[in-house]
Image (cartoon, rainbow, N blue to C red):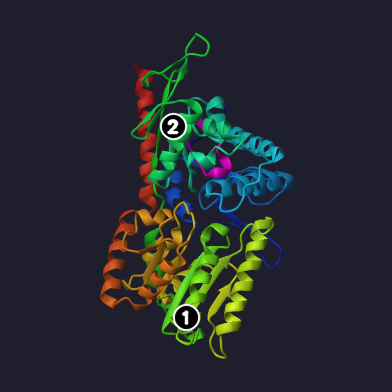
Amino acid sequence: MSAGFEFVVVSNRLPVDQVVSESGGQSWARSPGGLVAALEPVMQEQDGAWVGWPGIAGTQLEPFDVDGMHLVPIPLSKSEVAEYYEGFSNDTLWPLYHDVIAAPSFHREWWETYRRVNHKFAEAVAEVASKTATVWVHDYQLQLVPKLLRDLRPDLTIGFFDHIPFPPYGLFSQLPWRVQIIEGLLGADVVGFQRDADSGNFAQAVRKLKGFPSKGGQIEVPIEDPNPGVRVFEPVRYLGQSRKVIARKFPISIDAGAYRELASRPDVQARARQIRGDLGNPKHIILGVDRLDYTKGIRHRLRAYGELLAEGKVDPEDTILVQVASPSRERVQSYVELRNEVELTVGRINGDYSAIGHQAISYHHHNYPREEMVALYLAADVLLVTALRDGMNLVAKEYVASRFDNDGVLVLSEFAGASDELKRALQVNPHDIDGLKQSILRALQMPRTERASRMRSMRRHVFENDVRRWSGDFIAELDQIRAERGNAIGD
């Protein structure tokens, strides 16, 4: 084993995007996500590497560096992408973990590919991690990696963070490979979740499927007694005998300072004014920003808004709904059907209520750069987050961080993890269409003083609990376990 890296991040995708120049040249640029902003300083301080798929199927790449990050590409064939990622990850696990809003598909071939790809990731990490390194694995695509990695490298300290919800046992139990998933996650020393409910669901699944006791966010993983079939539980003392697994919430956040900085730029503020002008300077702009995904409740907000228009409670001449629906998983049939339904609904509402010079809904099915999104946040009087189930929903936090003017109203689904933190939002049950309509009207009519009071409170929370604090808290938990293990070995 080579000297390797002291800190290794593992995720389905590398934190870079391929850029093709006009001349046909290819290069790599850092992705704009908050996870990169949170982990890049740690990687630089601790001599870190990032392991993941580069996003190009059927391509074998050597490790390379971008912006001081050492990246280790995992090659995936087209069939592996189709079965591991589009299939098992996004057509089995994703709907199952999001309350079965869409029916999950259970295919043994997909599972075998998922298992094989997780092996590929684990083996790559085992090769690049130094002795007693810390490894942080991310998200539902790689739930088998912690155990596979522990089997290969028991010297490592391993963390896993679940970015999406973890389902109640009654739903999770539908998964034919539920035991293997639980065993995979229990290979980690720390398993992080977005909400208390998620960590509780995980602990319940562990108790039912493995019989391991848990208390206060700590799970005891047993050693095997010499007598076959008898489990013995011991406190953490020596590597290889018994372990504790910490399972609790670590709610993720954003690089709040970066959004505040962008929102303070004169050119971004000018663009926000231009957006309002391009939309006809309406009295109210309602904004929705989502991936085009059935978990986001886009159909529910369109129904509520359409009914408000039909009832004459919202005037399309002075109010407009701007819906940004980023393309998502466009080769998965349920997403194709969702796009068709959403676009038909938008067309019907616009046909009924738009007029020359103004639209009822301004719909955009593409991605925008961060500067444009911040300008939209500044232009919007109301942000609608109507997720039917969401691990966190960082758009809500981005909106709050951008509103340096302490204005704007956040209407937030109680089924998004952000609702646990952003208590001063107008919280809604998106299935309750009448309640959602009332909250939209309340947001449009809210006095300036109340808007400012609510926004100041939410901004204080977002800035005190930004993405760097999230990563720092998680890594501190891993460091403590690593220290305890070192002390036990030294006894």
What range is drawn magenta here?
A: 130-143
Q: From what the image shows, is residue 52 above or below residue 478?
A: below
Residue sitting at x 50%, y 49%: 68
Indicate the position of residue 148 as horizontal and vertical percent values. Answer: 57, 30
Q: Are marks 2 and 1 in contact (CB under 8 Å)?
A: no
Indicate the position of residue 151 as horizontal and vertical percent values. Answer: 55, 25
Looking at numbered disc 2 in the image, what kind of residue is underneath it?
Asp
Magenta stretch: includes residue 145: no
**Residue 9 seen from this side:** no
Choose between 331 and 134: the one closer to the eye. Answer: 331
Q: CA distance from mark 2 to mark 1?
A: 55 Å
Q: From what the image shows, is residue 341 above or below residue 173?
A: below
Indicate the position of residue 231 as horizontal and vertical percent values. Answer: 46, 16
Main SS type for the magenta part? Answer: strand
Indicate the position of residue 470 as horizontal and vertical percent values. Answer: 38, 48
Choose between 202 and 14: the one closer to the eye. Answer: 202
Mark closest to the chain's N terminus, 2 or 1: 2
Choose between 127 and 276: the one closer to the eye. Answer: 276
Which residue in the structure is indicated by mark 1? Answer: 311
Badge number at residue 189: 2
Q: Is residue 273 left or right of residue 1?
A: left
Q: Residues within 10 Å of mark 2 (few under 14, many from 20)?
A: many
Secondary structure found at label 2? loop
Q: Quadrant of the N terminus?
A: top right
Looking at numbered disc 1 in the image, what kind of residue is underneath it?
Glu
